[in-house]
Image: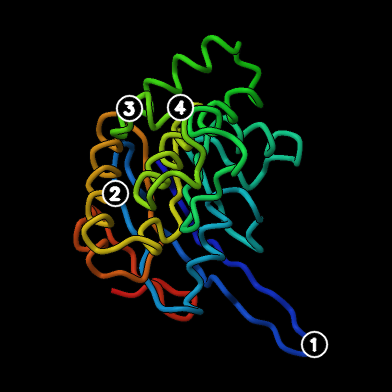
Amino acid sequence: MLKVKNISKQFVSGDTTVKAVNDISLSVPEGTFATIIGKSGSGKSTLLALLGALDKPTQGQITVDDKDITKMGDRHLISYRRDSIGFVFQSYNLVPNLTALENVMLPMEFAGLKTDKQKKRALELLKIVGLDDQKAGRRPARLSGGEGQRVAIARALANKPRLILADEPTGNLDSQTGKVIVDLLKKLAKEEKTTIIAVTHDESIAAASELTFRLKDGKLIK
């Protein structure tokens, strides 16, 4: 369960103070596929960074499974992000000189898992997202956009995170492939018992989600 209570994030530029996120409270149950939707400049990216423990709020509290991440020190945050959060990006962010299999194994290597266990889980995850052993051996340049995003999703699941944050996960995909990816995220949220939150400006993704939070000028709106 993700719980956000009265978080704000402000930035000071010269004599101006901007609240990119302004007193937001929300909760997302375990195993839910949720979306945060808003136009450019609405505060989506800032909120995503706060939820992913990439930045700290100016005020407020964020808890994941009753762990208050806003009170964690830098050392704990590094291990928390590695073990408890998965990230999926619009541009996939795959390592170009590694195969799909090796890309999925990478987070497990950082976590200290033995190589044979890394490979076994990576192959299982690639199969779950619909990629066979042949695709597992290809580098990102030899994969389609949809296949690349499937690899990114498998990689995000590698360390069995409690929370997956997806930043415009269909932004570089055609509408049909995008729908397949959204359906996959919904399915994985249930099967893996992982909370998945997608930040997007796409109304069709919001319509497909179980929970939708709308942002405007840093605030939640109905």
Q: Which amino acid does label 3 sit on?
A: Asp
Mark 2 or 4, which is nearer the eye?
A: 2
Q: Residues within 10 Å of mark 3 (few under 14, many from 20)?
A: few
> In the rendered image, which residue does mark 1 sit on?
14
Mark 3 or 1, which is nearer the eye?
A: 3
Q: Which amino acid does label 4 sit on?
A: Lys
Residue at 57% from the left image edge and 30% from the top image edge: 83
Q: Is residue 65 visible?
A: no
Q: Judge from the rendering whether residue 14 lies leftward or rightward of residue 162; answer left or right.
A: right
Mark 3 or 2, which is nearer the eye?
A: 3
For the N terminus, which image quadrant? top left
Say which label, 3 or 2, has the lower sequence index: 3
Q: Residue 132 carries which label?
A: 3
For marks 2 and 4, give the CA distance. 19 Å
Q: Residues within 10 Å of mark 4 (few under 14, many from 20)?
A: some
> In the rendered image, which residue does mark 2 sit on?
181
Is 102 in front, or is 79? 102
Mark 4 or 1, which is nearer the eye?
A: 4
Say which label, 4 or 1, has the lower sequence index: 1
Residue 203 spot, x, y in % from top left:
25, 70
Say which label, 4 or 3, has the lower sequence index: 3
